[in-house]
Image: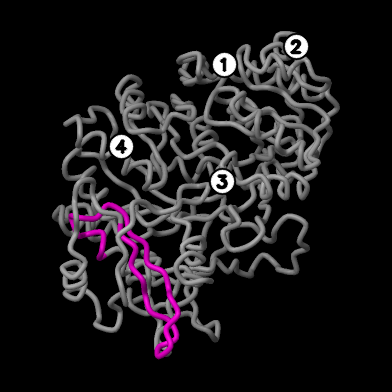
Amino acid sequence: MAQPLLISALLRHAARWHGETEIISRTRMGCTRLDWRRVERRARCLGEALLQLGVHSGDRVATLGWNHHRHLEAYFAIPGIGAICHTLNPRLNLEQLAFIIREAKDVGLLVDTDCLPLVASLQGLGIEFSWVIVMDEQGGEDEQEKPGFYNYETLLAAQPATLVWPEISEECAAGLCFTSGTTGDPKGVLYSHRSIVLHAMSVALPDGLGFSACTVALPVVPLFHANAWGFPHAAALVGAKLVLPGPWLDGASLYALLEQEHVTLSAGVPTVWKNLMDHLQREDLRLHHLQLLGVGGAPCPDSLIRYFEGVQGVSVRPGWGMTETSPVAALMSPKPNREHWSSEARWNWLSKAGRPPYGVDFRVVDEHQKEVSWDGCSSGYLEVRGHWVCRSYWHEESEKDESQWLVTGDVATIDEEGYLQITDRVKDLIKSGGEWISSVQIERVALRCPELVEVAVIAIPDVQWGERPLLLAVPRPGVQPDAQALLQYLAQHLPRWWLPERLEIVHSLPLTSVGKVDKKRLRSIFSGQ
């Protein structure tokens, strides 16, 4: 039978066959306990309310909020009625947010109470929405007195919950997410119902993140960041218990939630896991239920892998992807000959980015578009294609056919078994004396120094060589590292001409809105670029 792959069908399946499985949501009022049946009913009520507000098929409806049950309901309700869920990142600066909203032409907004000041500031830049729904129990009363402002729970209570999810084409757009704009203006990536469902099926597989009806999943990755790496849709696909942490992602809050709800699976960027690791080490705590930790968005530091696997007994699964790939395109899932390696060999191997699941293909090519050898040494430019890889950006006409490849901007190698290793971003490569130096490789070695907790390597201008590497290092609290000793350590593990021209000890590194080190800002500070 030819039935469309729809996001509403995922939710309907979870409610019908896993209706009593819990959905836990941490809000400022405490932990709210729902289940898939109630979430599906509430999503239908939200769908009815949106239709009454005049939302039509294809309209962009924006969300501005954290990981909680109301945002989850919007994730399903907006595409469920044929509209497009446009997730906004509250960590972006106002100018970027205004640019994105104007590009998308959003008709309305669902917003958390603590993000309302952003709405007021956006209005000061000329951004107006036809209506605004405040996603809170009672918060935002002052705003709700304004014309066009509504309370989420009041709207839902007025609906009869008789909506039947419409059957639409699986090729219809369902989600819109803009890139973080670290190298220019943000670009919009549009996801179809079909691509999101196929992506969820891949993420849920054992060689993905291994979702099942017995999984207790906590997405630390925000709902506003690249489909939350597929967590909401994969959880509905199998009827997993979902734990939503709200904005509280500090080590103590995460540990309490992981233990309280017996979380078995979580995923997020390395910065968050470093904070959790620091808390666990400082308080001498153990994780009793967590089994698998997904790490993405930036290279996974060796120290994280060794701590969570070696000390806490939690399997770490690094991966690689982009907003443009929905985002999961590769994961470090083992093959049979890797399962019985020693811990040391396994930890070294986990520094790679992963292999692609069915549905994604990639290649590494040289400057002449010729594919390089799969030997783990030959590097080139990474290109990708697949069922959930975008053809073009929002408002850009695509001239590509389905056989062409997306240029990722990454430099990489592929080894004999097909495992991808990201060696650098093209924009972060350092050209010194006509030869390329990988900033990522220097960073990986520097992070093995026990005195350091964070590092970044950028290019600085050099009269003789064109560019030379600068190492910026954040020491452990209370530690005064010796710069000369650190450079001597690097000299033992790196080619002589790769050694940083100088080393700067800094208190912290600036981060982007999605938790990555902001090298664009560092270059403007230290090299004037």
- According to the picture, the residue beneath numbered tag 3 turns out to be 226
Judging from the image, what secondary structure is the residue with disc 1 in? helix
Q: What is the C-alpha distance between the residues marked 1 and 4?
A: 32 Å
Point 26% across, 59% down: residue: 447
Q: What is the C-alpha distance between the residues marked 4 and 3?
A: 23 Å
Stretch in magenta? 445-473
Could you tell me if the residues under marks 1 and 2 are in contact, i.e. CB atoms within 8 Å?
no
- Earlier residue among tags 1 and 3: 1
Instruction: Indicate which label's residue lies in the foreground, 4 or 3.
Output: 4
- According to the picture, the residue beneath numbered tag 4 turns out to be 276
Q: Is 457 inside the magenta-drawn segment? A: yes
Could you tell me if the residues under marks 4 and 3 are in contact, i.e. CB atoms within 8 Å?
no
Residue 421 is left or right of residue 483, and the answer is: right
Point 21% across, 71% down: residue: 487
Point 35% across, 21% down: residue: 261
Q: What is the C-alpha distance between the residues marked 1 and 3?
A: 26 Å
Answer yes or no: is residue 437 visible.
Answer: yes
Q: What is the C-alpha distance between the residues marked 2 and 3?
A: 30 Å
Q: Residue 165, percent across and down?
A: 73, 25
Q: Is residue 241 above or below residue 352?
A: above
Q: What is the C-alpha distance between the residues marked 1 and 2?
A: 16 Å
Point 49% across, 55% down: residue: 321
Q: Residue 229, percent across and down?
A: 50, 43
- Earlier residue among tags 4 and 3: 3
Residue 178 is left or right of residue 469, and the answer is: right
Q: Nearer the viewer, residue 301 or 453?
A: 453
- According to the picture, the residue beneath numbered tag 1 turns out to be 37
- Earlier residue among tags 1 and 4: 1
Residue 304 is left or right of residue 83, and the answer is: left
- The image quadrant that residue 40 belongs to is top right
